[in-house]
Image (spheres, coloured by chain):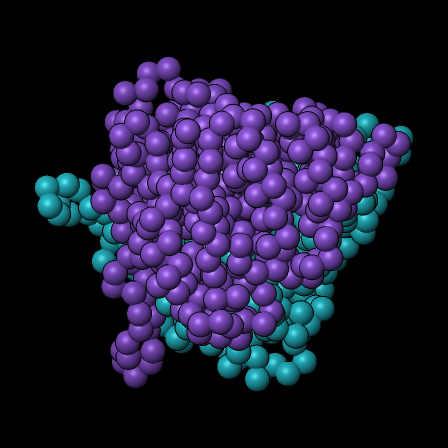
Chain colours: A purple, B cyan
Amino acid sequence: SRSYRIAVLSGDGIGPEVMTEALRVLDAVEAKFGFTTTREERLVGGAAIDATGHPLPPETIASCEQSDGILFGSVGGPKWESLPPDIQPERGALLPLRKHFGLFANLRPGVCLPSLTHASPVKNELIPNGFDVLCVRELTGGVYFGQPKGREERDGEPVAFDTMIYRKSEIDRILRVAFTAAMGRGKRLVSVDKANVLATSVLWRETAVEVAKDFPEVELSHLYVDNAAMQLVRRPDSFDVLVTENLFGDILSDEMAMISGSLGMLPSASLGKQKDGGLYFGMYEPSGGSAPDIAGKGIANPIAQILSAAMLLRFSLGENEAAAAIEAAVAKAIDDGFRTGDIATGAAGETKVGTTGMGDAVLARL
Amino acid sequence: SRSYRIAVLSGDGIGPEVMTEALRVLDAVEAKFGFTTTREERLVGGAAIDATGHPLPPETIASCEQSDGILFGSVGGPKWESLPPDIQPERGALLPLRKHFGLFANLRPGVCLPSLTHASPVKNELIPNGFDVLCVRELTGGVYFGQPKGREERDGEPVAFDTMIYRKSEIDRILRVAFTAAMGRGKRLVSVDKANVLATSVLWRETAVEVAKDFPEVELSHLYVDNAAMQLVRRPDSFDVLVTENLFGDILSDEMAMISGSLGMLPSASLGKQKDGGLYFGMYEPSGGSAPDIAGKGIANPIAQILSAAMLLRFSLGENEAAAAIEAAVAKAIDDGFRTGDIATGAAGETKVGTTGMGDAVLARL
Ligand SMILES: CC(C)[C@H](C(=O)O)[C@@H](O)C(=O)O
Ligand SMILES: CC(C)[C@H](C(=O)O)[C@@H](O)C(=O)O
């Protein structure tokens, strides 16, 4: 039977407890759809710092290298906040993983289900049917990794600098991911840049116009990043797919996640180069953080982690039926009124559940 | 009697019509508070392109140089959108004005009055008393102006680059403006950076911690820019003063303006070095754009322009009483129910007015 290897990196905070639910769901679809996965659980983030002194130990990287994809929980917490940035759990684990595996394409769905608009901070009359945006963020270029980066003394004072830099081929490949995604959805793509100020954005916009020729069915438009930050607030439901560079994508995808109102529901995928057969090596993780304030209480929403497992099945294993089954079961559990605290209103017809209860509700609907 | 020179740059779109109301209000406070202004109206933006081929003609700069401050309307519109960025109205006028006059400190109030929360896209229960944030944006440094910036060929493909760069003294001076502003308000300052990734942000954060020692009464905290973009959506009323670098400030101040729900009410000030006597040379303009879709219809909200004139009186002319009188008259006009279309709900007690009607309402309350 079909068999795969998955590196499981639960990390810190709510990571381990929501991961437990995702793995239970994975067990269930394996039995149902006839495939198996070998899972290697490895240390990452604060847990890895405590055990080994490093947020991303070599054994963890080695295990990821042997795998077909990485299921990631979340990292970070107050305990490690005063460490130097380089070895903090978030930065010291996420950036090296992205760079090492060339994970240049970050897919972040920003979904507000029609039944969950109450949880959005935005007025319900602005999003009567919720919304469903896909944010495609370039993840290995731009000012995050550009050289030179550092500090020197000039005219007797410190001067610090970072370099925002893009090769045309880096822009081209992320745009193709976004156009392809748009083809499978509403066929509308908004490319976000700051082409009135940045040279990198001018190249970005030119490349978008060129790549668009290969996707004549997709309607391409451009927004400046400041305007995009505004439009996401007022008209999130006007977007289909949004594509942008690394730093802008960091800001806008988080803004969008907050606007959706249910961070605990949002998965993400970070993909590398496409392999033969159309699959990707990738890393899959909830969009929200490690939420140390609610960790260990059994109340965290496991849906983001469960849907991250579904994305792994689709993009890295090609188990599309199993992925779709998970997504349908999650939708059904929400439809049937199951609510963790983050999305509950106390209205009639809701069943308030904890982490395991939500896992049970999804499992029962598989 | 006290007399001043003002450069009046109305620009495009709704600029001229809202400027008319601001100048009427200025006439009234001059008579009341015993000072005079000489006003030189000069071309800028699209209007200047049409007349002279350039968005910022030398005569306009010369006139600004002779003035105590610039009252700016707004620039841009569809007519000039296909020009190259460098000579487009927005970029070709705003960036050179900022650079020429060293306008490094951009003050952007993000205010949602308790009586106007309905106009905010955010749910009213999240902002029961509205909010009042002051965003302080560094305006002449960072990736906007950093060198090198451009494009070259590498390994047979185009590569584009921008440089995000800050001298410590540039960071120090904008932080002092922000701390000083916080002292005159709620004494809470949030400094926004991306110190987990950017070298410029590490220097920014260090400098903030240092400058804080000179303002022991101000409570300083730090947020990463992605987190700030989230918190502004969910808890705009938790902020007092926010300070950040140029690009982050561009994005966050626009996001905040949209969240306030009444872009047409928000003025801004862009200040240079402080002069003797504590005054600044500065440029004052509405936060919203030229709104070409409603230009010439007499329906635009003139309050942002009127409040920009009040900021000019306070920061560049030192006519604090006149400034306060204008602000009080605006607040009274809103309290008394006067509403332009952008902030109207149709509720009982509202009087719907156009641009001139709102100007009249403010004038009547001076
Ligand atoms: C931790 C940080 C470096 C990271 C980023 O900015 O990319 C995080 O904010 C994210 O978006 O995954
Ligand atoms: C027109 C543009 C260059 C400008 C900027 O980004 O600074 C504008 O968006 C603003 O915020 O005043």
Q: Position of residue A257 (x, y in %)?
A: 58, 42
Residue at the location (52% across, 29% down)? A323
Q: Is residue A229 left or right of residue B231?
A: left
Q: Is residue B255 left or right of residue A101?
A: right
Q: Quadrant of residue B82?
A: top left
In the image, B244 versus B87, the foreground residue is: B244
Q: Quadrant of residue A4?
A: top left
Q: Quadrant of residue A318?
A: top left
Q: In this rendering, does residue B201 appear at all?
A: no
Q: Position of residue B247 (x, y in %)?
A: 43, 54
Q: Position of residue A311 (x, y in %)?
A: 49, 35
Residue at the location (28% across, 76% down)? A152
Q: Is residue A166 left or right of residue A231?
A: left
Q: In this rendering, does residue B301 appear at all?
A: yes
Residue at the location (71% across, 68% down)? B186
In the image, B167 versus A22, the foreground residue is: A22
Q: Is residue A34 left or right of residue A68?
A: right
In the image, A147 versus B291, the foreground residue is: A147
Q: Position of residue B301 (x, y in %)?
A: 66, 37
